[in-house]
Image (cartoon, helix red, strand yellow):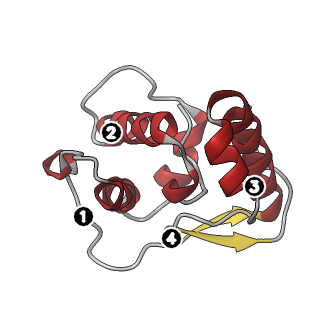
Amino acid sequence: MRLWSLHPSLLDRQGLTAAWREALLAQAVLLGRTRGYTRHPQLERFRAQEHPAQAIGAYLATIAEDATRRGYRFDETRIDTAAAGPVEIPVTSGQIEFEWQHLLRKLAQRSPDVHAEVSRGGPILHPLFTEIPGEIASWERG
């Protein structure tokens, strides 16, 4: 499971659909609807929120918005709980850099055209996240 701190606009088609699918799985875990993946380390930062279901709902909403912008139809009715207000999850600069390099490697192999376009800029964060100084997150297993 990879719940990117990066904005979904940086993902290729495969990455975008995987992000949607994996975030839906995360939502099911956080709502107690599945017995698998309950201890997945990527969920730690969502569980640490006052309202984890709202945080993952906000995460999914941004993915769905980007999918719509690209002409895909993700079923937004699958998002259980929309955030009632702004949600901000801190993410360290080290984690952002780790994810950025990881994404660039994936895109270079899988989608060279997207890699060429995305690599011209720098990492853009998913709006749910706020950058803070620090190393790679303790929950990162990549």
* Dot 4 and dot 3 residues touching (CB under 8 Å): no
Callout 4: SS: loop
Mark 3 or mark 1, which is nearer to you?
A: 3
Question: Callout 1, which amino acid?
Answer: Ala
Q: Which residue is mark 2?
A: 24
User: Which numbered dot is residue 82?
Assistant: 1
Mark 3 or mark 2, which is nearer to you?
A: 3
Q: Is residue 98 left or right of residue 111?
A: right
Position of residue 136 measured from the top left corner of the image (x, y, whole percent): 81, 50
Mark 4 or mark 3, which is nearer to you?
A: 3
Up/down of 79 relative to 19, above or below: below
* Dot 3 and dot 2 residues touching (CB under 8 Å): no
The 10 Å Cα crowd at callout 1, few under 14, some 14 to 19, many 20 or more, is: some
Q: Mark 1 to mark 2: distance in Å?
A: 13 Å
Q: Is residue 72 left or right of residue 128?
A: left
Q: Mark 3 to mark 2: distance in Å?
A: 28 Å
Callout 1: SS: loop
Q: Which residue is mark 4?
A: 127
Closer to the chain start, of discs 4 and 1, is 1
Question: Callout 4, which amino acid?
Answer: Pro
Q: Is residue 67 left or right of residue 76?
A: right
Position of residue 23 measured from the top left corner of the image (x, y, whole percent): 40, 42
- Residue at the image point whose x is 19% and y is 52% from the top: 76
